[in-house]
Amino acid sequence: MKFRVYRYSPESGLKPYMQEFVVETTRGMMLRDALLAIQEQDESFAFRHSCGDGVCGSDSVNVNGLNMLACTTPVAGLRQPVLVRPLPGRPVIRDLVVDMSQFYKQYRSVEPWLKRQDPLPEHEVHQSPEERDKLDGLHECILCGCCSTACPSFWWNPEKFLGPQALLTACRFLEDSRDQAAEERLDALAGPYKLFRCHSIMNCVEVCPKGLNPTKAIGRIKAKMLKGSL
Amino acid sequence: MSQGASGLRAWLLQRATALYLAGYAVYLLLFFILTPPRDYGAWIAWIDNPLHAVGLMLFLGALLLHVWVGFRDVLLDYVPLFPLRLALLALLGFGLAACGFWALRIIMAPLLI
Ligand code: SF4
């Protein structure tokens, strides 16, 4: 099977280029296995990966124009030659390895932890099954970055627009019955940039390997904001 | 507060004006199909009805606001350079205001005769 992978090493002084590799496929082969086979052919080829099972979110790459996790993508269904590029819009450190600092910074900016005003009880804070259900579709995010780096609004304004991932996380804490900082959280998202650069393009929904829907989460935040201001 | 206003309010304005624009577009379409005004006199008679005049002015206002929010979005997305963005926003504002007053004059003219 034919692969063309993005190669770039800032130290080399060469411009980025696509390098072709032929990989012998095996039954049930995932793209991550193919990348490992490529690495065997050329040790200088770099990419991130860890768990190999769609849990750690390390090996997100852009394949034939769509962001996906290499470890959960079977090579069998891919159009050849398979074009493998780094996540779009992020500075390339080397080959498929990109600098995700901005993405993590936006994640941190929504203060992704529970905040309580009441004194903490002796035991854990209780939550009804219905309250817990509200977190479904929000808490499963593995921070792979496929969504935010597929979002045009994040490409244009990565410093000011939080991006789908951080906004999904913001929604996750706004929906949590144990959190008591909703107003503060909503205030922090005010203004034209942080939240409202989202134009419901929905690239994030298309690429999320966990099947999450950041656009819907953003809609829920807007509805909460509206409720709080009318 | 003003921060919140420029995000949420613009978004709300866009949705609300879109609703009116969509409704009015359907009305206009039906109007032109069912009872198209044949001549200038018919137009004058139509606009003479305060209901029609107010509806049209609201349409005009909604359209201008909608265009303002839409273009502002485009400028916020694609023009990161602040002085340039400010200049373009001002230009847009003046342009839209000019369109508004001009259209208002056209609507009001027959009423003033
Ligand atoms: S929302 Fe989905 S695509 Fe975005 S970071 Fe989380 S798991 Fe990845």
Image: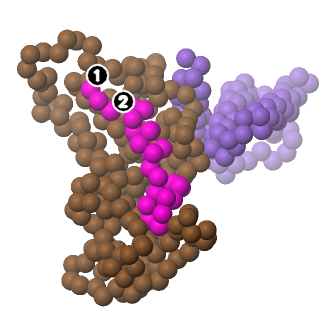
Chain colours: A brown, B purple
Residue B12 image position (x, y, % from top left)? 54, 30
Q: Identify the residue shown where x is 57% and y is 23%.
A: B3
- Which class describes the residues within 10 Å of circle 2: few (<14), some (14-19), or many (20+)? some
Judging depth in this view, the residue of B78 and A98 nearest the camera is A98
**Residue that mark 2 sits on:** A111
Q: Magenta residues? A: A89-115
Ligand 1: does it lie within 8 Å of the C-beta at label 1? no
Which x, y percent locates residue B82? 72, 35
Q: Which labelled disc corresponds to residue A225?
A: none
Residue B83 to residue A125: above or below: below
Q: Residue furthest right?
A: B113
x%, y% of residue A50? 27, 60
- The disc numbered 2 marks a residue on which chain? A
Three-letter code for the amino acid on which mark 2 is drawn: Glu
Dot 2: what SS?
loop
Residue at image mark 1: A115
- Towards the viewer: B89 or A63: A63
**Residue at image coords 70%, 26%:** B54
Identified at 7% across, 20% down, the residue is A123
A104 drawn magenta = yes
Q: Tag 1, which chain?
A: A
Callout 2 touching callout 1 (CB < 8 Å): yes
Total numbered labels: 2
Can residue A19 be seen in the rendering of this structure?
Answer: yes
Q: Amino acid at mark 1?
A: Lys
The residue closer to the viewer here, A7 or A173, is A7
Q: Is residue B107 left or right of residue A161?
A: right
Is B84 located above or below residue A51 in the figure?
above
Q: Name the side, left or right, on which B18 lies relative to B72.
A: left
| Residue A230 horizontal side relative to residue A10, left or right | left
